[in-house]
Image: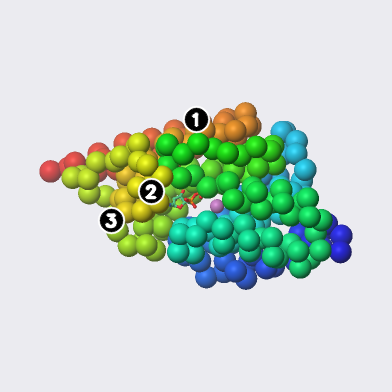
Amino acid sequence: MNQDEIIKMTEDYVKKELEKESSGHDWWHTDRVRNMAKSIAKKEGGNLFIIELASLLHDIGDWKLVVGDESVGPNMAKGWLKKLKVKNNIIDEVSDIIANVSFKGANYKNKMKTIEGKIVQDADRLDAIGAIGIARVFAFRGHHGGQMHDPDIKPKVNKTVEEYKRMDNTAINHFYEKLLLLKDRMNTETAKKIAEERHEFMEEFLKEFFKEWKVK
Ligand code: ADP
Ligand code: NI
């Protein structure tokens, strides 16, 4: 099987797996991450085959969706790529990226090492901010239950990894606990520039949100 065929088969597999996902991690999120990662790679370099495979597989079996087990995602990706007889070193690189891609609170130290991983992580994080990022937070909260906003509950930026993983925040507090932190955590210069604009849009949204909330 050549690389294009492997990508196409992987795309079909992921589409099927994520078809019914409704917490903001649906197939179109994956597709946007893949397109963004490829676009960033044009400027930043990196092995495109690894970047595309890791982008496509990054949310398969995510720990937030599969009862908190972080090894499920990377293992599912490994199993799939083995079936397609992808070379072992590529499989290792891809599953390593998937294992390290996720944001786990402001205190968690990023362990992404390779340029391919940094690009996929940036692309995933860019999809968490801006207009689409805003839409996804509320989709996530709707899916998992919980509140849109409660003025009596203040955000807690310095959550421990364990606290962050409880995911018991309001949608609005998630902006302060994650989304507004992302622009300063981009790995590549290309992503930093895109993040600035999306960040401003979120600031604008929050300003308007609180303005409307306050009307007496
Ligand atoms: P990462 O790509 O860092 O793993 P996640 O999968 O945690 O990102 O989150 C993707 C998106 O899902 C977030 O950007 C947000 O929109 C939503 N989300 C994740 N966790 C929460 C949460 N605790 N509260 C509200 N939204 C969340
Ligand atoms: Ni993702």
Residue 115, given in percent of the width and then of the height, sits at 69, 37
Residue highlighted by disc 3: 147
* 42 to the left or right of 208: right
The residue under the point 41% across, 45% down is: 161
Could you say which quadrant of the image residue 140 lies in?
Answer: bottom left
Give whichever of 46, 96 is nearer the camera.
96
Mark 2 residue crowding within 10 angstroms, few (<14) / some (14–19) / many (20+):
few
Q: Which mark is residue 184?
A: 1
Label 3–label 2 contact, CB within 8 A: no
Secondary structure beneath disc 1? helix
Residue 12, given in percent of the width and then of the height, sits at 69, 67
Q: Does residue 119 appear in this view?
A: no
Task: Give above or below for 101 relative to 147.
Answer: above
Which quadrant is home to the N terminus? bottom right
Residue highlighted by disc 2: 162
Residue 136, given in percent of the width and then of the height, sits at 45, 53
Mark found first going from the N terminus, 3 or 2: 3
Q: Does residue 128 appear in this view?
A: yes
Mark found first going from the N terminus, 2 or 1: 2
